[in-house]
Amino acid sequence: MAYMSEEGYQKLVAELKQLEAVERPKIVAAIAEARDKGDLSENAEYDAAKEAQGMLEMKINQLKATISDAKIIDTSKLKADTVQILTRVELKNVKTGMKMAYTIVSESEANLKQGKISVNTPIAQGLLGKKVGDIAEITIPQGKISLEVTGISF
């Protein structure tokens, strides 16, 4: 089951519609055009179009599976007293004093540039259930870090 926000769910649905309504017909047209050029056994354009079609269909199937497994979380029913999915967590590295903030989201919504980390990452896993003032000892590939939770919000 993939927990996500309403916004993340709507993005996935829009992407699926785009792939099915726009990208799929483009690839079908490319295959038809390549087929019209003659011998299919030596037609690189046809092979490339068929491969692109396979990749597109795989992406469409993945999106459909994610959407069908999606469970939309109503943030109005969540409390900001502990770290959980869809909460924005303000942190301070205990060793360096560096401050950072992340929003914990589903795998499909993760985007580090926007400060959104997947609930499946080691940092998010180490923070889940923590309260303001708690220190989380988290093992990451570079070693262990200690992060103090300084704020939780939505």
Image (spheres, rainbow, N blue to C red):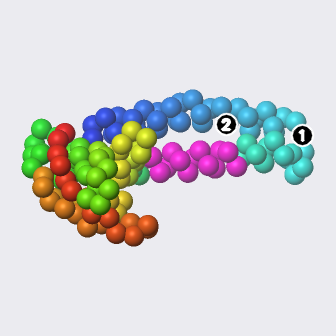
Left or right position of 142 against 3: right
- Secondary element under disc 2, as helix, strand or loop, is helix
Is 134 in front, or is 14?
134
Magenta stretch? 51-64
Location of residue 75 (image quadrant): top left
Cα distance, mark 2 to mark 1? Answer: 18 Å
Question: Which label number is shown at residue 49?
Answer: none
Residue located at (41% from left, 52% from top): 65
> Mark on residue 38?
1
Q: Position of residue 146 (x, y in %)?
A: 27, 63
Badge 2: residue crowd in 10 Å (few <14, some 14–19, many ≥20) = some
Position of residue 131 relative to residue 99, above or below, is below
User: x, y percentage for residue 67?
Assistant: 37, 46
Looking at the figure, which quarter contains the C terminus? top left
Q: Residue at x 59, y 44 (%)?
A: 56
Q: Is residue 114 left or right of residue 86?
A: right
The answer to whether 103 appears left or right of 50 in the picture is left
Q: Is residue 53 magenta?
A: yes
Q: How many marks?
A: 2
Callout 1, which amino acid? Gly
Quarter of the picture holding the N terminus: bottom left
Q: Residue furthest top?
A: 22
| Badge number at residue 27 | 2
